[in-house]
Amino acid sequence: MRVDIVSIFPDYFAPLDLSLIGKARGTGLLDLSVHDLRTWTSDVHRTVDDTPYGGGPGMVMRPEPWAAALDAVASPAAQLIVPSPAGRPFTQADAHELAELPHLIFACGRYEGIDQRVLDEAAARMPVREVSLGDYVLFGGEVAVIVIMEAVTRLLPGVLGNADSLTEESHAAGLLEAPVYTKPASWRDRAVPEVLRSGDHGRIARWRRTESLLRTAARRPDMFAAYPPESLDKFDRAA
Ligand SMILES: Nc1nc2cc(Br)ccc2s1
């Protein structure tokens, strides 16, 4: 997968040199380039913003540098991802979709955002997704891109050592993950649920599914309501 990130703060992406994303870059699973938007400015002050038409607070990112940047990094297979508080909610399903794509371009907005014509112009040549990571406002899109890059990269074949982890995790099957435990069997007088130490894999699977359903019902009624009723098995805590 090829990924191009355009930002006025390229140093924000140093974390993408670390851990499994850094390894994916090293092995060639991920071809990631980070670009400074100011590369495509033409004035001595390398200006990327200006005052908003219609008035209002703050500044808006100028279209010209963005148009030149996108022209420079685009490819016929590229899709543009723009984190925005006004975007569609980003979900695990979106992460799976993006993980299948050959080329992602991330545009990191700052200030009050990017001139809308940049997105309109881009949409004439490639799919454009404005995505939100939650109902809050950040200083810019950089942190959101790091989050999306983690969610997507871990789904790329070969990145996670144990691909099985992807089947059990939260949101994988439309449910939240069951609680997890490790040694010691008893810690500060708190014991690991006996079923998990029973060796009875059928019981363990039922217990985990029940815990997932209960957690989802309690913490994410929206997800629980969307869970297909035919998939609901009886709550069997006597697993
Ligand atoms: N939650 C989010 N806030 C912001 C702010 C800016 Br400025 C750009 C992108 C995003 S995504």
Image: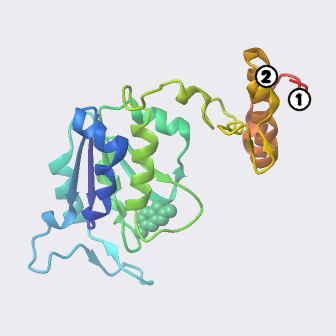
| Residue 153 picture quarter | top left
Residue 25: numbered disc: none
Q: Which element type, helix, strand or loop, lies under badge 2?
A: helix
Give the Cα distance between marks 2 and 1: 8 Å
Residue at image position (28%, 32%) is 29
Residue 52 in percent (x, y) is at 36, 78
Q: Earlier in the sequence, mark 2 or mark 1?
A: 2
Pick the front one: 96 or 28: 28
Residue 90 in percent (x, y) is at 53, 47
Whether residue 78 is visible, yes or no, is no
Q: Label 1 crowding class (10 Å Cα cut-off): few <14, some 14-19, many 20+?
A: few
| Distance from mark 2 CB to nearest ligand 1 atom below 8 Å | no
The residue at which mark 1 appears reads as 237
Q: Which element type, helix, strand or loop, lies under badge 1?
A: loop
**147 sits to left or right of 176:** left
| Residue 207 picture quarter | top right
Three-letter code, disc 1: Arg
**15 sits to left or right of 38:** right
The residue at which mark 2 appears reads as 206
Residue 234 in percent (x, y) is at 88, 23
**38 sits to left or right of 203:** left
Image quadrant of ligand 1 equals bottom left
Residue at image position (67%, 37%) is 177
Three-letter code, disc 2: Arg
Q: 46 above or below 229?
A: below
Q: Quadrant of the C terminus?
A: top right
Q: 80 above or below 99?
A: below
